[in-house]
Amino acid sequence: MSDRAFFTLDDSGAYIPTIFARSAWSDSMVNGPAVVAAAARALELEHGADGFQPARLTVDLFAPVRNEPLVARTEEIRAGNRIRVADVELTQGDKAVARATLVQLRRGEQPPGRIWRSGRVVEPPTGAADEPDKPGSNVFFGSGENPVTWDRDMGLHQNDQRKRFWQQPLDTITGEDSTPFQRAVTLAESTSLMTHWGDEGIGFINADLTVALARLPRSRDLGIEADEHISAEGVAVGTASLFDRDGVFATGTVVAVSNAGRQIDFTRRGPGGDSGGRGSLGGSERARRV
């Protein structure tokens, strides 16, 4: 357990943002990884079921999340024999700021036969050590192809090449180890960063996240690699693959809107991508009003 986490809990169970939840877009806002981590924890805690695989989480990030208490209210939608569905609404005051849906599927026997697979192999950075007691540590950024260049200095990878990110995600709650599902969802929010970050920084802010998981991660440190960026007239779609030390286990997809007026230039940030020892990386920090 660590004190490096996005939130503490108050007596009512509300999520109280820590310094690690602050946004790169604005100190008064909460970053995207923190928001999706809170949604994942609330749904898993209230509706996780033995024998079921968290297979898809979709989070709608439609309003600014302020640096204030965040309340999660969950609801079971269906509890079937093979499919379970639950929703959560995240609120501040009397206003909804995000919502999410979790789909869980029953684990079982693999069907017979051979299916086409890409055979793609994604390797973690050479020398990266799995440090279970140090969430937020072991941060590497990568770009390029064959060979991939990895480095701890984020600014060195501000280019127009394919991006990768390797990290042990922060815990969701201070003093509570995050589950594999929470860690996967936290890192998946970096789909926007990996797919929308170009040679002049990042100028898109994502409005959602969908993470689809064939299995849960097996290592505490995880990686994410961009698969595609599509954009036109200020609207973008990004897709990425999540991998652990055993290979690819999930995909992330986001849609995003232009935030060019507040473009973030990562060449002005220090190693690890942090300009002041605060906050977490992610593309959906709620700096804008919609």
Image: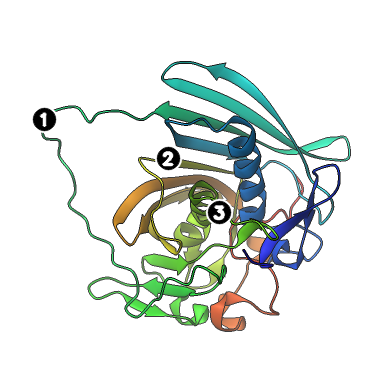
Decide: few, some or many residues near mark 3? Use Cα within 10 Å; few <14, some 14-19, many ≥20: many
Name the residue rendered at 52%, 61% in the picture.
193
Q: Give SS at disc 3.
A: helix
Name the residue rendered at 15%, 35% in the picture.
115
Q: Earlier in the sequence, mark 3 or mark 2?
A: 3
Using the image as rendered, state which of residue 174 and residue 18 is in the foreground: 174
111 sits left or right of 77 in the view: left
Type of the residue with mark 1: Gly
Residue position marked by numbered label 3 in the rendering:
186
Q: Position of residue 288 (x, y in %)?
A: 74, 53
Residue position marked by numbered label 1 in the rendering:
113
The C terminus appears in which quarter of the rendering? top right
283 sits left or right of 31 in the view: left
Q: Earlier in the sequence, mark 1 or mark 2?
A: 1
Type of the residue with mark 3: Thr
Name the residue rendered at 52%, 57% in the picture.
190
Name the residue rendered at 39%, 76% in the picture.
128
Residue 227, visible in the rendered structure:
no
In the rendered view, tell whether residue 167 sits above or below residue 218. below
Residue 45 occupies quadrant: top right
Decide: few, some or many residues near mark 2? Use Cα within 10 Å; few <14, some 14-19, many ≥20: many
Residue position marked by numbered label 2 in the rendering:
212
In the rendered view, tell whether residue 21 sits above or below residue 232. below
Q: Earlier in the sequence, mark 3 or mark 1?
A: 1
Decide: few, some or many residues near mark 1? Use Cα within 10 Å; few <14, some 14-19, many ≥20: few
